[in-house]
Image: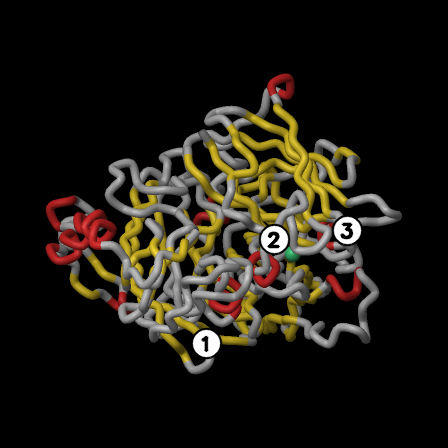
Amino acid sequence: MARERGGRKISRRKLLGWSGATLGAAAASATPGVNGLATAANGNGEQTGFAGFHLDVGRDGRGYAYNGKSPGPTIHASPGEPLDVRLTNSLPALDDDCVSDHNAFHGLNTTNLHTHGLHVSPTTDSSGRYDADNMFLQVVPREQRLNCDSPEFRRYETRYRFEIPADHPSGTFWYHAHKHGSTNRQVGRGLFGPLIVKDRPGAMPGYIENAAEQIFMITNRGLVRVDPAGGGEFDPTITMRPGEVQRWRIINAATTAESFVHISSSHPGLELHQIAFDGITLPKRHRVQSTGREPPWLNPAALSPGNRMDLMARVPPDAATGLTMVSALRSLAHFLHLDGVLTDTVPVQLAVRIAGRPVDHEWSGDDTLPGPGPGLPGFDDHQLKKRTITFGPGFRIDGEAYSGQIRQTMKLGESEEWTVQNNTNGVHPYHIHVNPFFVTHFDGVELAIDSPLRRWQDTIALPVRRRGQPGSVTFKTNFRKFRGKFVIHCHILRHEDLGMMQAVEVV
Ligand SMILES: [Cu+2]
């Protein structure tokens, strides 16, 4: 974290240290594509410098936007290929980075980029030349005055190269700002967008591969149907024909303590079949039949802040025409019996109109899916190192507000079993960067082998403390490919900013 160092601006050495990338910028022959996306004439090769996506952070009324829009443009990436993103910060200077308490809101116009759910390097690309999924970075506005020094400062811009492994799961991920001290403000007000890792051709059953796709994001402003170029339509009504099948990618980008939602359709004219969670394909599709009366951690169709779910939405060929609502209710208040206390329990709904000439879209009675793939193999249970981490009381982890000090050290390639406890009366969504985990227990009780909750996730609602005992989730995880320092934290992002975060390292 930034240290006070009387009146000194960012050092020239640091700027020079980054000059390779800066020169790359000058040499880049990228031409602006549609909607701010840059396209390269000659791919991502060093000859042409650095091309790919350009995300420029700016204001949008009271909110924030990428390239003038929120959500930002949908980024498509492929397993085995680098994803290049140039991030620039066109926000006005606030000169508020250098503080003594980094668990207070600060650096409000300082930003960075996190690829939520991707298994990529938390430090730099393999050449060391470009940044990767390093949430410690601080990309400051161009005119920002810095009265402290840190190797993590980047003036105005930085270049990210996310080297996506060839065996990376294909699925629904997202990107968002993650600068500690301003995360809630920036994500809550618009700095997020979808990040899709494309399916390998032929990997998915035909009825999935050939289906039209829609991306929805749940935000602090409501549900938005994403325009791939950026922005989108809030509270949309979509039309589906009898016989139609669509793939819906739903991303919960909302940040608040009321943002636990569950997806349901009570209408027989619209079937919802879950095929993936947190970007990782399930071994078997299952029909969503949720009431929203379960606590969020026991509802397979619930989305904590940060979670994603892929659904196949299907209108049976004989469905009657009509209007139905898919609810993404804020289910937490109901579970905690807080109705009447919390005012922010507005249901988020998607209207689906069933109308038009029937179509004969592909479907299958076989519910088998390819599963997570070779990048996420099973575990040898005899080799698991165990550790316990406790959220709370207060916005602390293991008794400490975020210090930047490494509190868990894991060895590359080793598998571990973690129990994450919640010693509070509130639901906190636990999130770990870089490495997803496979959930096996809630409150010490093992899930049945065929439970739909027994799955890979990167974010999970921690059960609350009950009868004086902390709630807990137990999972297995493997630190497979990347060394480096990153974080675990609560994905109620205000809690993170206030200190509910811990640094960890793979060595
Ligand atoms: Cu929290």
Residue 314 in sight: no
Amino acid carrying mark 3 in the image: Val
Structural distance between the alpha carbons of marks 1 and 2: 24 Å
Residue picked out by circle 2: 500
Of tags 1 and 2, the one toward the viewer is: 2
What colouring style does the render use? secondary structure
Query: For this rendering, which residue is in front, 496 or 232?
Result: 496
Q: Secondary structure at mark 2?
A: loop
Residue 113 visible in the snapshot: yes
| Type of amino acid at the residue the image marks with label 2 | Met
Position of residue 402 relative to residue 413, above or below, is below
Question: Residue 150 location in percent, x, y?
Answer: 35, 52
Which label belongs to residue 464?
3
Hey, which residue is sitting farthest bottom in the picture? 61
Which comes before the other along the chain, label 1 or label 3?
A: 1
Q: Residue at x 34, y 45 (%)?
A: 162
Who comes first in sequence, dot 2 or dot 3?
A: 3
Gap between marks 2 and 3 measured at Cα: 16 Å
